[in-house]
């Protein structure tokens, strides 16, 4: 891979990352931000991001081709899975979507440029401007690439210099994204740093914590707590911890004509990023009383997943993951042999995919990598009661329902605590302006100044 050494992650693997090196990088980023980024207009930044997105959608774009050639070996994702995921992300980097994001989060698309007012603010003789932190550190999880790329987009819109910390051997896609920015706008690329090292290196992290104004982190709840307690008091902390998601299929959606489409959509959610993101379903609740029973739906889903595996394979997984899936399968094979309330369907001679049907509706977390539970329920009340152990940690509900019933179900899910409800098939494809974990994304980064006239 012949990339220029613009970023720390481009250096040979044996190059030591030291606290002094990171501090110097942070200070350089601050200077570059003040010189190249701080006074850029929102319009110009949106244009750059739009151009960047269009480049990545071009199959002939060299950096995209490099990503699809090299990333399967380091990420484990099959080429088609990567291609679909990248298309979904970069397809949303449009001028319209970026403006809509800023307007949603800040009330005005020029809020980051100057003191402006909405109609309500104008009537109150007020105006306001929002400003981002000077230097942001993003600590990424590494399992799915798009969240890290989106963090960089938000940081650019906020006029923040940024350091993206990746765990060892997970920086490839983020690096290629950073190089594409550098290619289009070198001065903006100079406001960004990509580095990787193993988590838990407190010497490196503590040195950076003293230099930055904001830390965003995606990871386990324990990892978030460990970082939070070590941050200086003035550093803003934005943490995104452990979340789970599931799907819900209403009985009215289970008509003979509709089921094939539902199956394809459910498989879309299972195979997207191999079910590894927080938005991926661990299970599907299927209402009893439809033209297709919950158990039949599970069996048909297994057949659909088998077909998809032929065209969009899961890709390789480690020995530990394969062993975990095999152990989980063995448990349900024994249960299915002794009970009519459990059934199992799985790929032959591999751990590529697994569907487990259980009559018991209790919420269970999957071992992921295309392993899904299907559980029958009488109604939403039973499903929510069964999912109570996950309450407060549910990110997304993929809903298959229609009309007034869909609205009623969505309202009940919202009151129960789900922070995002979307159509089945779109769970791993949130809009650019979704509110991550029910919170503002760009809005969380900024500080406001009000001008009372």
Image (spheres, helix red, strand yellow):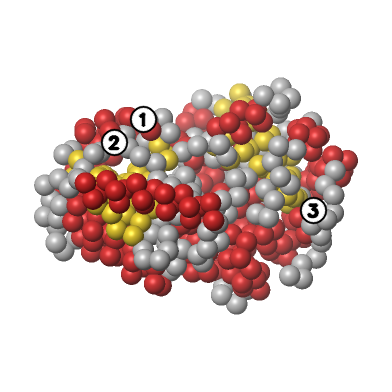
> Which of the two labelled residues, at mark 2 and mark 1, occupies the earlier sequence position?
2
Task: Please state if 355 lies on the left or on the right of 101 as rendered.
Answer: left
Task: Quarter of the image for the N terminus: give it.
Answer: bottom right
Q: How far apart are marks 2 and 3 (CA)?
A: 47 Å
Q: Residue 8 carries which label?
A: 3
Task: Please state if 357 lies on the left or on the right of 229 as rendered.
Answer: left
- The image quadrant of residue 23 is top right
Q: Is mark 3 on a helix, strand or loop?
A: helix
Neighbour tally class for label 3: few under 14, some 14-19, many 20 plus, Cα within 10 Å: some
Q: Is mark 1 on a helix, strand or loop?
A: helix
Task: Quarter of the image for the C terminus: give it.
Answer: top right
Please provide percent x and percent y for residue 225: 61, 28
Contact flag, marks 2 and 1 (Cβ < 8 Å): yes
Which residue is rendered at x = 50% and y = 37% of the image?
Answer: 242
Which residue is rendered at x = 20% and y = 60% of the image?
Answer: 259
The residue indicated by pointer 1 is 389
Q: Distance between the residues labelled 1 and 3?
A: 42 Å
Neighbour tally class for label 1: few under 14, some 14-19, many 20 plus, Cα within 10 Å: few
Neighbour tally class for label 2: few under 14, some 14-19, many 20 plus, Cα within 10 Å: some
Q: Distance between the residues labelled 2 and 1?
A: 9 Å
Q: Is mark 2 on a helix, strand or loop?
A: loop
Above or below, 44 relative to 122: below
Please provide percent x and percent y for residue 345: 29, 58
Give 406 or 340, whichever is nearer the viewer.
340
Contact flag, marks 2 and 3 (Cβ < 8 Å): no
Q: Residue 362 carries which label?
A: 2
């Amino acid at each position: 891979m012949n990339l220029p050494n613009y970023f720390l992650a481009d250096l040979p693997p044996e190059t030591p990352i030291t606290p002094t090196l990171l501090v110097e990088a942070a200070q350089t980023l601050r200077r570059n931000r003040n010189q190249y980024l701080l006074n850029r207009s929102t319009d110009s930044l949106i244009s750059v991001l739009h151009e960047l997105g269009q480049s990545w959608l071009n199959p002939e774009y060299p950096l995209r081709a490099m990503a699809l050639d090299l990333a399967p070996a380091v990420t484990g994702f099959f080429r088609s899975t990567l291609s679909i995921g990248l298309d979904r992300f970069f397809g949303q980097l449009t001028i319209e979507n970026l403006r809509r994001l800023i307007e949603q989060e800040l009330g005005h698309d020029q809020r980051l440029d100057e003191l402006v007012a909405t109609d309500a603010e104008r009537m109150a003789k007020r105006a306001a401007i929002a400003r981002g932190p000077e230097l942001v550190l993003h600590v990424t999880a590494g399992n799915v690439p798009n969240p890290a790329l989106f963090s960089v987009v938000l940081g650019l819109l906020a006029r923040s210099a940024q350091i993206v910390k990746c765990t060892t051997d997970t920086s490839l896609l983020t690096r290629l994204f950073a190089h594409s920015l550098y290619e289009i706008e070198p001065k903006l690329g100079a406001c960004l740093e990509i580095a990787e090292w193993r988590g838990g290196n407190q010497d490196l992290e503590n040195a950076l914590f003293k230099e930055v104004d904001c830390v965003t982190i995606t990871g386990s709840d324990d990892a978030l707590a460990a970082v939070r307690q070590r941050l200086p008091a003035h550093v803003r902390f934005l943490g995104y911890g452990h979340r789970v998601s599931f799907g819900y299929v209403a009985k009215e959606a289970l008509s003979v004509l509709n089921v094939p489409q539902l199956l394809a959509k459910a498989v879309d959610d299972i195979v997207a990023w191999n079910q590894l993101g927080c938005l991926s379903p661990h299970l599907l609740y299927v209402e009893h009383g439809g033209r297709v029973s919950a158990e039949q739906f599970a069996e048909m889903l297994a057949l659909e997943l088998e077909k998809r595996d032929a065209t969009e394979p899961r890709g390789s997984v480690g020995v530990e993951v394969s062993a975990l899936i095999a152990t989980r399968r063995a448990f349900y094979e024994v249960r299915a042999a002794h009970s009519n309330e459990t059934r199992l369907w799985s790929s032959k001679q591999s751990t590529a995919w697994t569907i487990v049907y259980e009559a018991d509706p209790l919420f269970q977390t999957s071992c992921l990598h295309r392993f899904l539970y299907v559980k029958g329920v009488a109604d939403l009340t039973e499903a929510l009661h069964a999912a109570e152990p996950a309450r407060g940690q549910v990110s997304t509900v993929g809903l298959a329902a229609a009309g007034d019933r869909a609205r009623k179900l969505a309202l009940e899910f919202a009151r129960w605590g789900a922070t995002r409800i979307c159509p089945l098939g779109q769970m791993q494809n949130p809009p650019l302006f979704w509110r991550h974990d029910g919170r503002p994304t760009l809005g969380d980064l900024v500080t406001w100044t009000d001008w009372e006239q």
